[in-house]
Amino acid sequence: MLKLHYSSKLFKRYLSSALYLTGDKAREQFAVLVPYLDFKHKLGDFERLKRNVRLREYPLDCDNLKLQWDLYRDVEKRKQDIERCRTELQKRIQQSTDEEEKKALKARAVQARDDLKMLKERSYAVADAFIANNFLAIPNDLHERTPEDSGKVLHEKHAPPTGKSSGQNNLVEEQFEQYGPSCLYLTGDAAWMDLRLPMRCCETFQEQKYILFCNPDFVRTFLLEAAMVPKDSLYLVREDDEPEDKVNLLHLCGGGSLLGFLGYFTKLSVFPSVLPLRLVASGKRYHFERTQSNEVHVFGACKTAQEAELLFDETVQHCRTFYDQLPVGYRIVQVAAPELQPAESMRVDVELYDEQEQRYVKVAHVCYLSDFLSKRIAFIYQDGKAQKFPHIVTGQVLSSVDLIKLLLRNGIRVKDLPFLDKFGAK
């Protein structure tokens, strides 16, 4: 039996990483993958790293990271020195003809083996402290197009006032029956919109050669860590006979999310001829302490950063095509560095104007992740004999609950959305 748990307190005992398991933990826990640890890129320029952390206002202690990095390198160097010593001793043992000398060399070789074994056991704690708790917490590099301190409006569409009164808030209450954060029922126009808007959004992207995907609703902890999604933002699913020390747990995310795609691409190797990939999925998305929603998520993968930037701009344009059909004003905003999620290099938000509330409401976003996520889930493509990591563009291009509430609050019904007629609206 599977049981949902709502309290974030359950995560306090799971201190180990599920994405990176040291050798001692791998004896008891199943290591799904080994992420690519690009030390040279991430730690080769500490000033750039500090600037990235500062602009993001991200809680990472760079000075402590540097100390951990130095300690880790020192331990790895000592292990390599002992390995070289053992290799030299083996060669000398094979070449020696003096039995007494051989005996002494063999004793030294045994001592070197024991020293290496002891050092490896002690190095696990060093690697765990540095990689699992520090290195894997380093956020993605900022894209040059990301503003440093405040967002930038890239596109704005104004719409004539609907002329509806604020009494339309009663319509929202009538058609949204909410019984807590995990239970929501929609009726009337809200239910029709919840059915048709995701279908029409998916079709908009399918017309642009996107492939319709169906994703699972559940993911393991290592994928949350790979995407740098907080564990307490999703529901934890407890399984029968689950060991107390298990770190790779099960979480309810919903198929209409980035996490839903990641299980498919983890440890996947593709030919470069299949890139760029363009995928779109519609499904539920479950949030801890937030109402579940039908959402549409896109996922794209390209060989190079240049191709990915073009795909990013194309995806934003496809969003404009969809939201241009709505009789409300909206804007597209380039998000500033402090508002980015750790895995994001660049993001734009789609914000619809709520005439009744006199404010903009975010209903969608598109983000560029570079090859940051591919390295963490071992998603590769073959370039001759070399293995390279695709650059990823992804985004939630529709969130039905937020959108429907805004439409109903401003007096917009199904009959006011003629582009849904093809699905049988009357």
Image: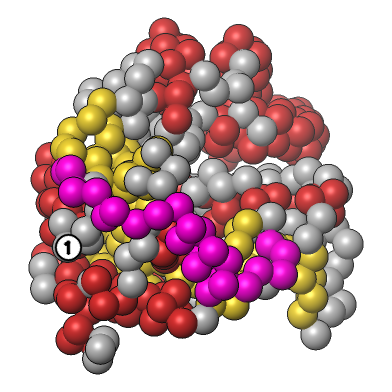
| Magenta stretch encompasses residue 175 | yes
Question: In the figure, 184 relative to 289: above or below?
Answer: below
Q: Nearer the viewer, residue 417 or 283?
A: 417
The residue that disc 1 covers is 325
Residue stretch in magenta: 157-181
Residue at screen point 52% across, 49% down: 226
- Residue 338 position in % (x across, y down): 45, 24
Q: How many marks?
A: 1
Number of residues whose C-alpha sits closer than 10 Å to that of mark 1, classed few (under 14), some (14–19) or many (20 or more): few
366 relative to 195 in the view: left or right: left
Q: Is residue 93 visible?
A: no
Could you tell me which residue is drawn at 70 percent across and 36 percent down? 128
- Secondary structure category for the residue under label 1: loop
Quadrant in the picture for the N terminus: bottom right
From this viewpoint, is residue 321 visible?
Answer: yes
> Residue at position x 60%, y 22% from top?
59
Q: Nearer the viewer, residue 382 or 48?
A: 48
Image location (x, y in percent) of residue 200: 24, 75
Residue at position x 18%, y 49% in the image:
160
Quarter-of-image position of residue 412: bottom left
Among the 4 quarters of the image, the one containing residue 207:
bottom left
The percent position of residue 362, horizontal first and vertical second, equals 39, 46
Locate the C terminus and report the quarter of the image it occupies: bottom left
Image position of 378 (left or right of 416): right
- The picture places residue 342, in percent across and down from the top left corner, at 48, 35
- Image check: 10 left or right of 368? right
Q: Is residue 67 magenta?
A: no
